[in-house]
Amino acid sequence: MKRPLESWLPRAAYPLVLALGIALYLGLLALGAPLLVATYTPVVLGMVAITGLEHVIPYRASWRAGRREVRDDALYLVLIQAALPRLLSFLAAVTLLSWLEHAPLATLQLWPAHLPIGAQVVVMLLAADLLRYGLHVLSHRSAFLWRLHAVHHSPERLYWLNVGRFHPLEKALQFLLDALPFLALGVEPDVLALYFVCYSLNGFFQHSNVALRLGPLNWIVSGPELHRWHHSRLAEESNGNYGNNLILWDVVFGTRFLPRDREVGELGLPRRDYPVGFLAQLAAPSPDAAPGAAPSTVLERASAGDAASATASTETR
């Protein structure tokens, strides 16, 4: 018999933490808190909450990380996921953005700044995810990009801290698509900050070792039930679910993958001697398998005449 927590937490934890994080951000802003405080307070509390959930309702006990993993993933989170984008934002601000202020585009006011902050974040999520979707697909097809992206696929178990395991060159490419365009369009800092809160909390959940059951939300957000398959060791399973925050573009392009009849197996790269340390992975050694151009993706299986089975395999639980 399940304990009460095990009955409702898997379905309630994600929307509850996300809603509380957004409410806390908006509440702190309304109270006059500095933007940095209002932004990072819900993010840090989200880290704490998801760490607790990993102990209360873990997806797999064997996915609990060791000290070395935690050390390396903490370095990735602090240096690559947090510090590098801030450095790139500063460089953009003092170079490109100062030029754009005097460029013809500056007078066009392309961004819908008249919309409420929540609506602007939704527009940003849809646009940024479309751009990141394209990059992510290419990262599974291009030998050069896969060499960088393989760093993110190297973990053999998922927990929230390894969400930041990216090669710095790949992180810089991501910045060009999910941050720089919106800085150039003049999106207000409070909108960018709320996007960051949603992006961070969803990302922590996406990689978490928490036994969530998102139900219909699995057709909207790219959560852990979907993202685990993207980290499968099998290429035919990992070449799908490319969405960063949302799964909507995978639905549109036919790459959503969520089998009803089984759980994900082994995670990681086919090459089991791939380096695991922070500095060793920055050298970006080439994995022994080709990227997603070689194995078929869900989309390619459908176009080859297997559309019926592909659709059946992607029905939500």
Image: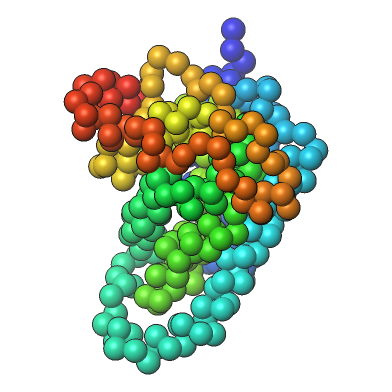
Image coords of residue 217 (percent x, y):
38, 35
Question: Going 66% across and 54% down the picture, which residue do you hit?
Answer: 282
Q: Position of residue 202 (x, y in %)?
A: 51, 45
**Residue 226, quarter of the rendered image:** top left
Q: Position of residue 24 (x, y in %)?
A: 56, 55
**Can the viewer see residue 243 in this picture?**
no
Along the line of sight, which residue is nearer the eye, 204 or 129?
A: 129
Residue in view at x 45 percent, y 82 percent: 97
Pick the quarter of the image with the C terminus: top left
**Relative vertical location of residue 116 with respect to residue 203 in this rendering, above or below:** below
Instruction: Identify which residue is drawn at 21% across, 29% down.
Output: 304
Q: Quadrant of the N terminus?
A: top right
Against 286, residue 155 (above or below) is above
Measured as percent of width and height from the top left, residue 189 is found at 49, 72
Farthest residue toward the bottom? 102
**Residue 11 located left or right of residue 2:** left
Color style of the picture = rainbow
Q: Count the labels in the image.
A: 0
Q: Nearer the viewer, residue 125 or 275?
A: 275
Q: Is residue 268 above or below residue 108?
A: above
Tell me if residue 295 can be seen: yes
Q: Judge by depth and name the residue closer to the eye, 109 or 244.
A: 244
For the point 79% across and 40% down, the residue is: 68
Q: Furthest residue to the right?
A: 67
| Left or right placement of residue 126 versus residue 205 in this view | left
